[in-house]
Amino acid sequence: MIDHRLQVLRMVASRGTVTAAAEALGYTPSAVSHQLRSLARELGVPLLAREGRGVRLTPAARLLLARSEELFARWEEVRAELAATGDRAVGSLRLCGFSTAAAALLPPVAARVAALHPGATVRIIEADPAECFDLLLADDADLAVVVATASLPPSDDPRFEQEPLLDDPLDLLLPADHPLAGEQSVLLEQVAGDHWIMDRPGTAYHQLVVTACAAAGFTPSIAHQATEWDTGAALVSAGLGIALIPRLARLPADYSLARVPLRGDPTPARHLLTGVRRGSRAQPAIATALAALEDVALTRRAELPGGAGSTPPDQ
């Protein structure tokens, strides 16, 4: 097995500080420091250097990490091969995803894995996209469903395998008595003069909406800020503004709302990805979950407003 101290070094490199790495791993900072000092003594090279009030990785540490990535990937492949022999029972599968995925995609995936792998323990963890990759790295999750944002590891990060899952179009959310509420589809510029309900500035979703509006030729007039879909839906229902909402997001049935698909080229959408540790996707439970995710995501898209008859993205 791979020396666990390499995993600790990986997490320090990923999170940037000993304290943040300790939090992600469930250790104390002193335990992280002790393990890295022990590894440095054993290898005979310094791994961390003081830099102000923090630390930085030495060239030796960066070389060690670069060379060890292949070890981690090969170890995941070995685990997959052992599981494929049938001599090793499927023990557990940890699925993680942002709120919409955790609600709309992951429950049926978990049910399918449990049905096909009797005795396996399947757990769902709701987490922000960047946190999902920390969970993968710490071996606290096996499969992540995330929204593509600038905060994620790059697609060629050697620690992970990332694949497109689904484009989740944004629909226009209007009060039920809005003049456009009965339309089959609308152009975004048709609501340029409306007041908007959006997430806080600095968030990925805020940037997505602002970018979509800019492409349509206007800057939205923000009347209210809401983070949760329920809150935004309540504000829209009360006639306090309009919003864009992902097609996969479910809304309370008792609000007076109209959900209208957008048309135009391009129409704004969130891009959903799957992420696993490099080399792990052939492990039986993970492979089952990945296949189930593709089926469930496409089914959900077809079920929701504007989804019927739409063309799924290339997988």
Image: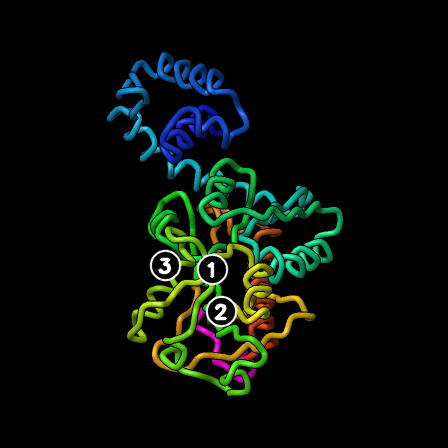
Q: Which is nearer the N-term, disc 2 or disc 3?
A: 3
First in sequence: mark 1 or mark 3? Answer: 3
**For residue 66, side relative to residue 295 (left or right):** left
Bounds of the magenta segment: 306-315
Q: Residue at x 69, y 70 (%)?
A: 254
- Distance (Cα) linking label 2 and label 3: 18 Å
* Residue found 39% across the figure and 81% down from its top: 190
What is the quadrant of residue 219 in the picture? bottom left
Q: Mark 1 — residue?
A: 224
- Residue drawn at (48%, 54%), measured in percent from left and top? 146
Q: Residues within 10 Å of mark 1 (few under 14, many from 20)?
A: some
Mark 1 → mark 3, Cα distance in angstroms? 15 Å
Lower sequence index among marks 1 and 2: 1
Using residue 63 as the reference point, say whether residue 76 is left or right of it: right
* Amino acid type of the residue tagged 1 in the rendering: His
- What type is the residue that disc 2 sits on? Gly
What secondary structure predominates along the stretch shown in magenta? loop
Q: Residues within 10 Å of mark 3 (few under 14, many from 20)?
A: some
Residue 99, disc:
none
Which quadrant of the figure has residue 287? bottom right
* Front label number (2 vs 3): 2
Q: Secondary structure at mark 3?
A: helix
Mark 1 and 2 residues: CB-CB less than 8 Å, in contact?
A: yes
> Left of 244 or right of it: where is 124?
right
Image position, residue 253 (x, y; %): 68, 70
Where's residue 202, x and y in %?
37, 51
Give above or below for 131 relative to 245. Answer: above
- Structural crowding at the residue carrying mark 2, measured as other residues with C-alpha within 10 Å and reported as few (<14), some (14–19) or many (≥20): many
Q: Which residue is mark 2?
A: 241
